[in-house]
Image (tube, rainbow, N blue to C red):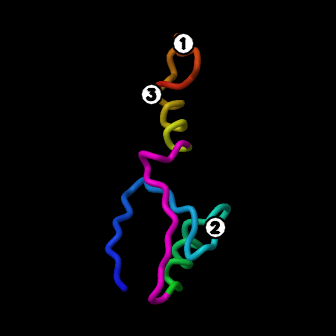
């Protein structure tokens, strides 16, 4: 079975074939993907749904003294 899936720049890969990528380097994640053979299962959080990226971006945007919460959405 072939599935056409698009992973966009900024999407966060959570796991590759059930193995978490937390704590792994970019090169290690690439190796996991390359050694997967004919079957690849990615658990991905789209950038627009990734709360970690949303908060991180908001913290960088909000550098004004009047920003009480530190978050601007």
Q: Nearer the viewer, residue 47 or 65?
A: 47
Please tell me the numbered disc located at residue 65. 1
Secondary structure under tag 3 reads: loop
Secondary structure under tag 1 reads: loop
Near mark 1 (Cα within 10 A), the count class, few <14, some 14-19 or many ≥20, is few
Which quadrant holds the N terminus?
Answer: bottom left
Q: Looking at the image, which residue is at 50% across and 75% down?
A: 41
Near mark 2 (Cα within 10 A), the count class, few <14, some 14-19 or many ≥20, is some
Q: Which residue extends farthest right?
A: 23
Secondary structure under tag 2 reads: strand
Mark 3 or 1: in front is: 3
Say whether residue 13 is magenta.
no
- Residue at numbered disc 3: 73
Q: CA distance from mark 2 to mark 3?
A: 30 Å
Residue 28 at x, y percent in the picture: 59, 73
Q: Looking at the image, which residue is at 38% across and 56% down?
A: 9
């Amino acid at each position: 079975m072939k599935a056409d899936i698009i992973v966009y720049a900024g999407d966060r890969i959570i796991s590759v074939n059930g193995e978490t990528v937390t704590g792994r380097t970019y090169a290690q994640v690439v190796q996991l993907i390359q050694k997967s053979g004919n079957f690849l299962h990615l658990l991905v959080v789209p950038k627009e749904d990734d709360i970690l990226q949303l908060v991180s971006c908001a913290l960088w945007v909000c550098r004004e003294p009047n920003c009480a919460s530190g978050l601007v959405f």
